[in-house]
Amino acid sequence: MLRILQKGGHIMARKIPVKLILELRAAKLSMRKIAAIRRISRHSVSEVFRIANERNIAYQDVKDMGDEELYQLFFPEKHFIETMFEEPDYAKIHQELKKVGVTLKLLWEEYTEACQEKGAISRGYSTFCEGYRNFTIAHQLTNHLDHKPGERVEVDWSGKTMWYTDISTGEIVEVFLFVATLPYSQYSYVEPTHDMKMESFLRCHIHMYEYFGGVPTRTICDNLKTGVVRHPKAGEVVLTEDYAALGSHYMTAIMPTGIRKPKQKASVEGTVGKIATAVIAKLRDKRFYSLPELKRAVAKEMDSFNHQRFQKREGSRYESWLEEKPYLQALPALPYEISHWENARAVNIDFHVIYKKNRYSCPYQYAGKKVDLRITDSTLEIYHKGQRLTTHGLFPAHVKNRYSTHQEDMPPAFRKIVPWDDTRIRKWAAAIGPNISEVIERIFRSVQIKEQAYNPSLAVLKLSKTYTEERLENAAELVLKRGARNPRYHHLSSILSANQDILYAQQKNEPPNPEEASMGYLRGTAYYEKGGHEDA
């Protein structure tokens, strides 16, 4: 439990009540008793007892000192840290929050700018928000309960379902509806799916964030088994690994509601009922023959639903969403990549693993062993005891009985052995592109005898097997632009593993933004290697 101290209209984090502890100690109360009756941590009480013993300080010696003075005497380091920050004016902040469109995030940014102007140190955003929460508790104020733009999205599965007819079998296929609502604007998203399993649940979130054009700070969900492992009455909520990873990727806090507490996500609960009329009822007499066809019809009805005028307020959900969109966090450069694992798959005697009737190679030394496969929409990775052995492009679903074989995975007897020399290495680099050729040339120029460049050059070129030649060429262009005079494998590997080359390729194809011209330039690595001097 927090105890708040007010000073000059500001709020300060709880401090250890040193004087009170000494007074109770003088009254012959034990550490355990003081901690229990005053709700102070045992560690804090123990610290005060220890310091008092070390310095031979009794309550009678300090009873005339003020609380702040005594606290500073016992904990000078903590006092320095706590007083080095500029305290926000939470009374003013509480009033500002009542205004339309004003958020804690906006007020924190203004507070940070004000601190910078006066040369003071500002609080971090999470501490700033915690301080405001404490302020409302200390002053018995109600937190502003109106929905804030960009603060949250509420998601759920509709209890009502739809269906379509499989044209090839005549079978009636049940379809489930994923529903999401931004409480501030009431802008809503609905997606039909074949099931309510984890992969469908995650894909709906990815599509939802794209539909909203940004990511709210919080994602409020029900206690679904697909997303929540455990939600105890006391203690930390445990999310499934995939759901937690999605929240981390989109920088949104996944927050399940309390058990059997639908009011905690009232907006989506209300939307679910409206969807029954806006979508399900309106489409009840229409027949559909595939999921994509049904999705298109639902999307059309949802567009009409979001553009309908409100009955009790001005505008529409769409118009309110236009106001809310600037408050949403930007989408990440790349969408979350959903993957699944196939464990304990046998490597055949031909050093290939079979997945969906296609064969993918791994190093021949693992023939006869068990490996794990990580499959995404576009790649298949082979792991052995947690170590990635190789990566392949995934064959499309309609392709059968095809081989994906890396030459380096083959036994030596299977390979056509051609000795490596500088000519062959440069020829391989030239086939990939001019930037990777320049990287290889710089490697050769950095050594005294050309044979010393063979291994580092081949290490760089073999990255095209793990990724692609196009990605390696983009990574080479990026590393050269950054000013690396002697690029090596680790420069390119770090760019590729972080997908920086993909983002760079996207930015190259975008028209230049004139506003970015005023942002300066990025210094190359040579600047820092030379102690702050770049060659002209």
Image (spheres, rainbow, N blue to C red):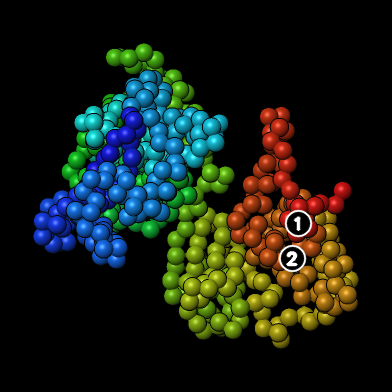
Q: Residues within 10 Å of mark 2 (few under 14, many from 20)?
A: some
Look at the picture and state if 261 lies above or below 371.
above
In the rendered image, the residue lying farthest to the bottom is 413
Does 310 sit left or right of 438 as displayed?
left
Which mark is drawn over residue 531?
Answer: 1
Q: Nearer the viewer, residue 78 or 323?
A: 78
Q: Position of residue 36 (x, y in %)?
A: 14, 55
Q: Look at 64% across and 58% down and name the residue there.
A: 496
Which mark is drawn over residue 341?
Answer: none
Q: Nearer the viewer, mark 2 or mark 1?
A: 1
Residue 408 visible in the shown view: yes
Q: Which residue in the structure is indicated by mark 2?
A: 488
Check disc 2 and report its element: helix, strand or loop.
Answer: loop
Does 360 sit left or right of 356 as displayed?
right
Q: Look at 71% across and 29% down and name the residue there.
A: 514
Q: Look at 39% across and 20% down and name the residue there.
A: 100
Amino acid on which the number 2 mark rests in the picture: Arg
Q: Position of residue 119 (x, y in %)?
A: 54, 36
